[in-house]
Image (cartoon, grey):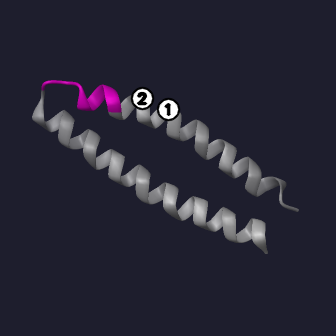
């Protein structure tokens, strides 16, 4: 059954959109700490996306 993995990718897209709006709001603030937090969060999202997409892709091809 490959439907859960397709739903996982769709949910990942929704989470990415919401998290990127939060990251942009942090990066646009004048505070250095907010910018650093935004960039750190961007790195965490990128790493999480890599592993989730890799996992779902491997399950879809299996």
* Quadrant where the N terminus is found in the figure: bottom right
Task: Left or right? Give the position of 39 relative to 2.
Answer: left
Up the image or down, 50 lies above or below 29; here it is below
Residue 40 located left or right of residue 6: left
Residue at image mark 2: 21
Residue 4 in picture, x, y percent from top left: 78, 54
In this view, the residue in front, 17 or 33, is 17
Q: Nearer the viewer, residue 57 or 36?
A: 57
Secondary element at image label 1? helix
Q: Any mark on residue 18, and which?
A: 1
Secondary structure type for disc 2: helix
Where does residue 50 sit, x and y in percent of width and height?
50, 61
Q: Are marks 2 and 1 in contact (CB under 8 Å)?
A: yes
Task: Using the image, tell me which numbered label, if any, was put on residue 49.
Answer: none
* Part of the protein shown in magenta: 24-30
Query: Which residue is drawn at the image coordinates 66% and 50% (left, top)?
Result: 9
Image check: 40 left or right of 47?
left
Quadrant that contains the C terminus: bottom right
Placement of 34 over or under 8, stated as above or below: above
- Label 2: few (<14), some or many (≥20) within 10 Å? few
Q: Residue furthest front?
A: 61
Residue drawn at (31%, 26%), measured in percent from left and top?
25
Q: Position of residue 46 (x, y in %)?
A: 42, 53
């Amino acid at each position: 059954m490959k439907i859960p993995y397709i739903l996982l990718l769709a949910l990942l897209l929704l989470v990415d959109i919401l998290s990127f709006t939060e990251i942009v709001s942090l990066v646009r603030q004048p505070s250095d700490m907010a910018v650093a937090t935004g960039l750190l969060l961007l790195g965490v999202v990128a790493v999480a996306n890599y592993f989730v997409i890799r996992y779902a892709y491997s399950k879809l091809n299996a």
